[in-house]
């Protein structure tokens, strides 16, 4: 375990509850900590629910609160009802997602084209004990083929498949890309080696169809870059990191080497640090040092991390709307994790679709 981690500075009781409940392994110590929070003063339960939904972990939060009858009894009936409905609906949604994925896999299997599950589509099957623990906006996939190499006459069928061939399918959004995926490379901000990802991918089954998933080290780094996209404190992203580490034997030397190769070692450092600070995610001694983040940048990242980037979980994504982004305090930590070149590239990507940038 990493020693002497910085600690959060005065998190709200609502945030403390959410951090405690964002985990699959909910131990007696977590139950005691949860009960201690509720004995101090009443919580803003509407905010707890709204934040849990916004952070994609409402069913998991409710599952862990339900393991503590004394705690659950303090949740207002109206809020408890919202948690219950959200969980019930998500159970159905994840079953529909599995069927949707099965259809895509079957389509490409008939054409001998492998498909790799990305992000939640992969984690639901390899990390989480129940896929409905977390909320997913869409289904992310990578196709082991470049678009120019795919038969042109068959492309309309691909587009129809992804868009949905019937009302049922159209309700399950699929986001797929040829050979790579923009969420993994953050819109090509980092030189991710997708050839290596495909080479080291591992087989799994989704219902009766074959699929691929990333090797654990690639999966972890993809979760770290996704955490940066979500301003590092989104609970689902933090939970993904912690649960990947818990579910898979990680070759940490490979994680460090790959992070350097992809030039995302500062992102990885920040994501792993925040996961350890908030969810007590166990990290090997020295792994953060091995990422070799400059001291001045570590200090800036730790300063902002201790203060949750001057935001709460409820306000993380709030701010003035500009350049198709919410510009608030929550954006400070991601900015601290970018090199200057990466920051300028990211600004160029964000502004590319605006008239004044042309």
Image (cartoon, rainbow, N blue to C red):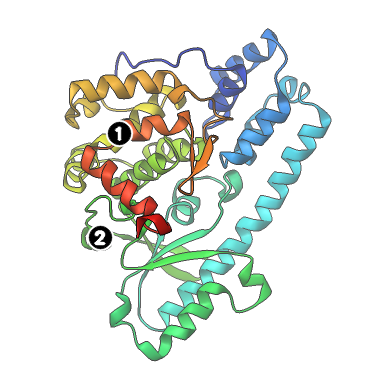
Q: Is residue 201 above or below residue 231?
A: below
- Residue 226 percent coordinates (x, y): 40, 45
- Of labels 1 and 2, earlier in sequence is 2
The numbered dot on residue 177 is none
Q: Mark 2 = which residue? A: 194
Q: Quadrant of residue 67?
A: top right
Viewport quadrant of the N terminus: top left
Q: Nearer the viewer, mark 1 or mark 2?
A: 1
Q: Mark 1 = which residue? A: 337
- Residue 250 percent coordinates (x, y): 29, 40
For the residue pair 119 and 315, the one nearer the viewer reads as: 315
Residue 159 seen by the camera: yes
Tell me the crowding category of disc 1: few under 14, some 14 to 19, or many 20 or more residues within 10 angstroms, Cα based: many
Viewport quadrant of the C terminus: bottom left
Q: Does 356 sit left or right of 40 as displayed?
A: left
Image point 66% across, 71% down: which residue?
A: 168
- Residue 171 percent coordinates (x, y): 64, 66
């Amino acid at each position: 375990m990493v020693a002497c981690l910085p600690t959060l500075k005065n998190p709200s009781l609502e945030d403390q509850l959410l951090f405690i409940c964002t985990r699959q392994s909910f131990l007696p110590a977590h139950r005691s900590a949860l009960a201690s929070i509720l004995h101090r003063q009443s919580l803003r339960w509407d905010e707890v629910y709204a934040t849990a939904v916004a952070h994609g972990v409402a069913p998991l939060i409710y599952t862990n609160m339900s393991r503590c009858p004394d705690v659950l009894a303090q949740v207002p009936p109206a809020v408890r009802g919202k948690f219950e409905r959200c969980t019930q609906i998500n159970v159905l949604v994840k079953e529909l997602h599995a069927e949707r994925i099965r259809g895509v896999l079957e389509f490409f299997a008939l054409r001998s084209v492998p498909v790799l599950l990305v992000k939640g589509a992969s984690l639901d099957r390899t990390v989480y004990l129940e896929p409905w623990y977390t909320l997913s906006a869409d289904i992310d996939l990578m196709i082991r083929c470049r678009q120019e190499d795919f038969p042109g006459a068959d492309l309309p069928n691909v587009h129809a498949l992804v868009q949905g061939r019937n009302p049922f399918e159209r309700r399950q959004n699929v986001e797929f890309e040829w050979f790579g995926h923009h969420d993994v490379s953050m819109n090509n901000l980092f030189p991710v080696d997708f050839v290596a990802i495909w080479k080291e991918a591992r087989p799994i089954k989704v219902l009766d169809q074959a699929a691929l998933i990333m090797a654990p080290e690639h999966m972890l780094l993809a979760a770290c870059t996704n955490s940066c996209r979500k301003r590092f404190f989104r609970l689902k992203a933090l939970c993904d990191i912690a649960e990947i580490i818990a579910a898979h034997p990680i070759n940490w030397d490979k994680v460090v080497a790959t992070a350097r190769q992809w030039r995302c070692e500062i992102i990885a450092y920040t994501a792993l640090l925040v996961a350890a600070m908030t969810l007590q995610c166990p990290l090997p001694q020295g792994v953060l040092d091995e990422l070799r983040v400059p001291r001045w940048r570590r200090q800036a990242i730790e300063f902002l991390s201790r203060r949750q980037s001057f935001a709460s979980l409820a306000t993380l994504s709030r701010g003035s709307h500009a350049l198709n982004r919410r510009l608030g305090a929550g954006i400070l930590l991601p900015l601290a994790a970018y090199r200057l070149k990466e920051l300028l590239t990211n600004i160029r990507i964000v502004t590319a679709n605006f008239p004044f940038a042309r």
